Amino acid sequence: MQIKKLETMTSRTGRQMQRYNEGCRQVVGCIPFRLRNVNESPPIGGSLIDEIEVLLISSQKNAQKLMFPKGGWELDEELAEAACRETFEEAGVVGTLMNELGIWNFKSNSQGIFHEGRMLPLFVEEVRDIWPEKDVRDRIWLRINEARERCAHTWMKEALDVWTTQLLSLHNNKRNATTTCLVDVVNSETINGITAQREENTWMEDDVDVWMSDEPVSLHRKGSNPTTCLGEFLSSETIMCITAQSGEEEVEYCLCS
């Protein structure tokens, strides 16, 4: 879910509309994240985890206490709406939500109330200079490992661990799916032939037509019907992964510059 325009610059207050589940106050938060500056050199032997920064904010009561943005889920909101609203109010960022990471039950040390917390990653697309809680919170971008060390709440650290595990699994799956690829430009119309090495001594030779344009790309084996495909740039080094869907079969190719 995306929020492109947020009219109010005042945080919601009060508990009249607060949701509860079996006596537990329901709260929702986000792990705002972005890719590191592309002009920086990635760590040697680094992975997808090393390319990501997450945003922590300070507590209103203690500026040294850092956490992810979170707040009450109210009766007039869907889960995604509450997550985006709280993240904008507290951290001043706007973006696209990803899948929910889970549910955690915890007791607030300050209020002595049991809570049911949910967390969702949010890919940050806009960082506002002015936001509702600008005057009472600081914000800081950190790498994932640094953020885990400095985050004050155990349940938020556990949510970050869940997301990190998902990222590592995604990264490893992509690495295992395709290894070395050779891309041959056949002619000026950018038709490419792909040869991929999937195992140490096994080569899969597969000619495909890749027609690049402003519209969705057409990817198909020589002599077969075109299928729709999705191109994804995996890093600043212009490595692109192409997944093609043809009937029940899904085929993945990796283009390496």
Image (tube, rainbow, N blue to C red):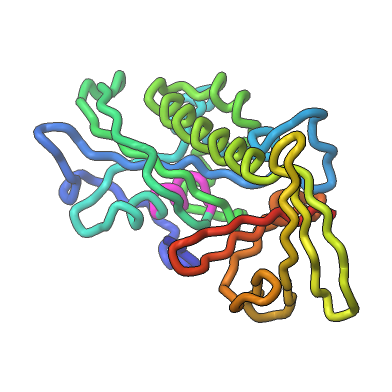
Q: Is residue 246 left or right of residue 198?
A: left
Front-most of residues 224 and 18: 224
* Total marks placed: 0
Q: Is residue 128 visible?
A: no
Compared to residue 256, the image places residue 158 above or below, namely above
Q: Residue at x 75, y 50 (%)?
A: 196
Q: Residue at x 60, y 54 (%)?
A: 127
Which quadrant holds residue 105?
A: top left
Highlighted magenta segment, given as a residue range: 85-93
Magenta span dominant secondary structure: helix
- Magenta stretch: residue 87 in it? yes
Front-most of residues 189 and 17: 189
Where is residue 124 drawn, in percent x and y? 57, 52
Where is residue 82 drawn, in percent x and y? 33, 52
Where is residue 91 drawn, in percent x and y? 51, 45
Q: Quadrant of the N terminus?
A: bottom left
Q: Residue at x 52, y 35 (%)?
A: 57
Q: Is residue 200 left or right of residue 21?
A: right
- Magenta stretch: residue 152 in it? no
Which quadrant holds residue 118?
A: top left
Where is residue 13 drawn, in percent x and y? 29, 47
Compared to residue 257, the image places residue 208 above or below, namely below
Front-most of residues 30 and 67: 30
Q: Residue at x 67, y 56 (%)?
A: 253
Q: Is residue 125 left or right of residue 13?
A: right
Front-most of residues 32 and 222: 222
Q: Is residue 13 visible?
A: yes
Q: Is residue 21 left or right of residue 63?
A: left
Q: Quadrant of the C terminus?
A: bottom right
Compared to residue 142, the image places residue 242 above or below, namely below
